[in-house]
Image (cartoon, rainbow, N blue to C red):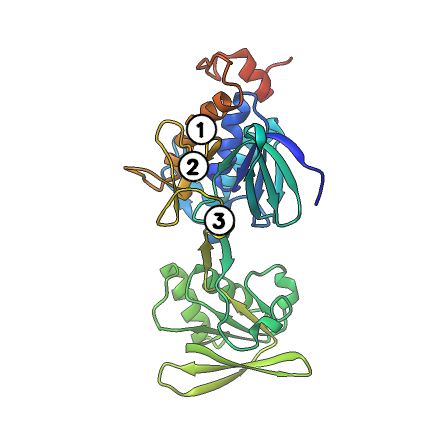
Amino acid sequence: MSDPIATEAVIIGAGPAGLFQVFELGLLGIKSHVLDSLAAPGGQCTELYPDKPIYDIPALPICGAQELVDRLLQQIKPFGAGLHMGEEAVSLEPQQGGRFRVVTSAGTVFDAGTVVIAAGVGSFQPRRLGVEGADGFEGRQIHYKVRSAAELQGRKLVVFGGGDSALDWAIDLAPRAASLTLVHRRAEFRGAPASVARMRELEVAGKLSFVEGLAHALHGAAGQLTGVEIKRTDGTLQSIEAEQLLVFFGLAPKLGPIAEWGLELDKRAIKVDTEKFQSNIPGVFAIGDINTYPGKKKLILSAFHEAALVSFAVQHHLYPAKKQFLQYTTTSPAMQKRLGVVAD
């Protein structure tokens, strides 16, 4: 365990809601640290649909999901928030004096005045290949995310999945692989129609093969994966030589340790009020998809609104004797200094 990091606020979740919370707190002069179990900021936007357009962000008629995350990261730069990526919050314990001890999976410890949970639908874990012995090859020859496309060049590849990720990587890698087989449990795909059409073109051209079925067994020798056996939809078995398996079954959200923190839950969501978006634990707030209240709508726009109100609630919780003023970035010298748009 590290020595505790003292901070006014810990934000659990680095998706759009958590990043905008940094901004709203920063405007009020409140410092924060952000934790996320994923390796990079962005939450669902980065992991599930980075290239997909979003049309309901105010003043941006169209904005890519990753573009939105990049813009938010740029927006929070003046506030110098600590980003702790690849660290899941594993415990939250109230302390004497109303503060909180937060510990991450990496052993980082925080002494926080408040906690804002912006964890989306929970921490994301890849849906794994449900075949005996698969765990022994994970990270070596079975992958749930492509980290280096160059390392897959000239290899015998099998791609599993029927969504955009599976289709996009099959299309991208097919011209460079020694062989590539796409396996999906049915003939219909969840991915973009244009991607399906391109995959079919590559299939006709002999650049890739498509098999309708499910993984049934793995073949190996001397500790190395050599192939995979597919159970086709007609019940027959087909063996395919493979050096690398790429599995894109999506990410499964899990509430994880949050469920053990004594928070009042309703169907895996944290119940909050609509004045402060505070949970049943004073000083612990929740915004975005992780919370629930009458009339809740799971929209990024709603999460931004919640973050704005939470910032004032956090300020009052930390400094109850301090009189609050509603200030505007267009006219407030203090806010403009914090944003770095005027000199000290």
Q: Residues within 10 Å of mark 3 (few under 14, many from 20)?
A: few
Please state which of the two labelled residues, at mark 3 or mark 2, is closer to the viewer.
Answer: 3
Q: Which residue is mark 1?
A: 310
Seen from the viewer's position, the closer of residues 62 and 114 is 114
Measured Cα–Cα span from mark 3 to mark 2: 18 Å
Identify the element where label 3 is drawn: helix
Horizontal and vertical percent position of residue 12: 53, 41
Q: Which residue is mark 2?
A: 287
Horizontal and vertical percent position of residue 246: 54, 68
Mark 3 or mark 2, earlier in chain:
3
Q: Amino acid at mark 2?
A: Ile
Q: Residues within 10 Å of mark 2 (few under 14, many from 20)?
A: many
Horizontal and vertical percent position of residue 78: 60, 26
Measured Cα–Cα span from mark 1 to mark 2: 8 Å
Q: Amino acid at mark 1?
A: Val
Q: Which residue is mark 3?
A: 260
Q: CB under 8 Å between callouts 1 and 2?
A: yes
Q: Is residue 47 left or right of residue 105?
A: left
Mark 1 or mark 3, earlier in chain:
3
Horizontal and vertical percent position of residue 176: 59, 69
Q: Is residue 152 left or right of residue 248?
A: right
- Which quadrant would residue 76 be assigned to in this image? top right
Residue 104 vs 170, above or below: the answer is above
Q: Amino acid at mark 3?
A: Glu
At a point 37% along the width and 62% down the height, the residue shown is: 190
Q: Residues within 10 Å of mark 1 (few under 14, many from 20)?
A: many
Residue 167 vs 69, above or below: the answer is below
Residue 290 vs 331, above or below: the answer is below
